[in-house]
Image (cartoon, rainbow, N blue to C red):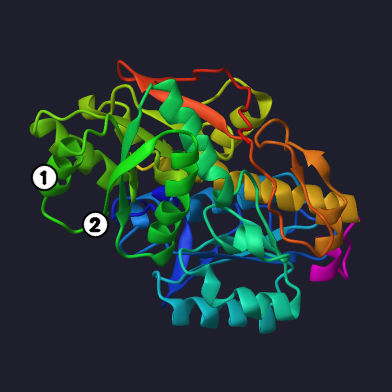
Amino acid sequence: MSTSCRRGWSPGLLFVALVVGATLVSFPAPGDAAGGRGKPWAIGMICSCTGPEASSTSVSAPTLVAWADAVNAKGGVDGHRIDLIVKDDATNPGTSLSEVESMVSQDHVLAIFDNSDVDNAFETYVAAHHVPVIGSYADSTAMYTNADFFPNGSTINREPQAFVYLARRVHAKKVADLYCAEVAICKQDTEAGIPVFAKAGIKVTYTAAIGFAAPNYTAQCLAAKDSGATAMTVGDAAAVVVKVAQDCAAQGYTPVQISGDGTVAESWRTTPAMNGNLDVQPDIPFFVDSTPATRAMNAAIRKYEPSLASSPDFGEVVVEAWTSGLLFEAAAQAAHLGNGATPAEVIKGLYDLHGVTLSGMAPPLTFTRDKPTTGISCNFVMGIKNERWTLPIGLKTVCPK
């Protein structure tokens, strides 16, 4: 469905970075510059951290800065410090391609973390240069169509089946779908999901594109209400989802909000109109702090990016960004990367991973040599009840066919 599109500007979110035009270069943690024994590894990160959809994606950059700082504080990966190069394409395809070209040709990055809404602009380029792109969010067509893209969780092509699962849990026979007008994949996801719902006996009774800057969504709420929809999915920025739910509630219309991927954020929990919300997530829910892996992530964020931990935009994109770092670590160790490491070796390391869950942070991940990754369908399930995050099926995953 259209939940892939999720942003909105968050001016209060700060992170440790040097701003040079659209380029953000992370600083290592104090004292760790000489901590590694081997040659540093350059890794790129491209994000749509500003622009119409930034309230969700903007958190990805400080998360990966915290990951790199935490890794470097321990001496790096197998003794190699991470030099993280973060660039913001501002949701501009031309900027995105130019920045990726610079990272590949000038910075000689081993891999690129992808949290861009316009990654289709550079997918042909990175494929031609065989530089692996590791998903720091899974809602991209390239993540399941391009063999040089490696998702860190369930892929967006399998999300409609997961949404059917949610609709059935709330006994919805009719669903409304609102999707972001700014990014093409939002409409594409909605169109792909409609026949999947129909096959399951669930009708999508109303769809509409919405703008992030719209003063209100009253008209769409009333149309959805008139269509008889008892559940709604809003594929947009986390802040926009809340605004839609509030506008609908003001009209006496409170459909169950079903969502997925990176639309979810901490700001939802205390919003009355979001009570009863259910979500599917490509990685472990962001509020979980009961496993060694999630505790390590949260501790690193509190230490190196404390403003992120208290941000209302703190949400699932944080986990997706963090697990992309873990996926690189796993590939680097599997490939036994050294001082002369190459992107090809990173790709080999990724292919050597079979059923890896990154210490329970992700569903089982397996990549097939020279083929796109189309079969990661398992999702975690989370929700909201009485201003508390919930795990309706625990930390198991659901893998709908």
- Between 153 and 112, which is closer to the camera in this rendering? 153
Residue assigned mark 2: 212
- Between 120 and 312, which is closer to the camera in this rendering? 120
Q: Amino acid at mark 1?
A: Thr
Residue 60 in the magenta stretch? The answer is: no
Q: Which residues are magenta?
A: 336-346
Badge 1 local density, few (<14 within 10 Å), some, or many (20+)?
some
Answer left or right for 45 relative to 176: right
Is residue 152 depicted above or below 284 in this figure?
A: below
The answer for how far apart the CA atoms under marks 1 and 2 are is 14 Å
1 or 2: tag closer to the N-terminus: 2
Quadrant of the image occupied by residue 180: bottom left
Q: Residue 142: horizontal and vertical position, in percent? A: 60, 64
Q: Is residue 287 visible?
A: no
Answer left or right for 279 relative to 354: left
- Residue drawn at the location 74% of the way across and 79% of the way down: 129
Q: Amino acid at mark 2?
A: Phe
Q: Residue 323: horizontal and vertical position, in percent? A: 63, 44
Check the image and name the residue furthest to the left: 251
- Residue drawn at the location 59% of the way across and 38% of the way down: 283
Is residue 36 depicted above or below 400 in this figure?
A: below
- Label of residue 162 in the image: none
Answer left or right for 268 relative to 347: left
Q: Residue 363: horizontal and vertical position, in percent? A: 68, 36
Q: Residue 18: horizontal and vertical position, in percent? A: 47, 67
- Between 162 and 386, which is closer to the camera in this rendering? 162
Badge 2 local density, few (<14 within 10 Å), some, or many (20+)?
many
- Label of residue 218 in the image: 1
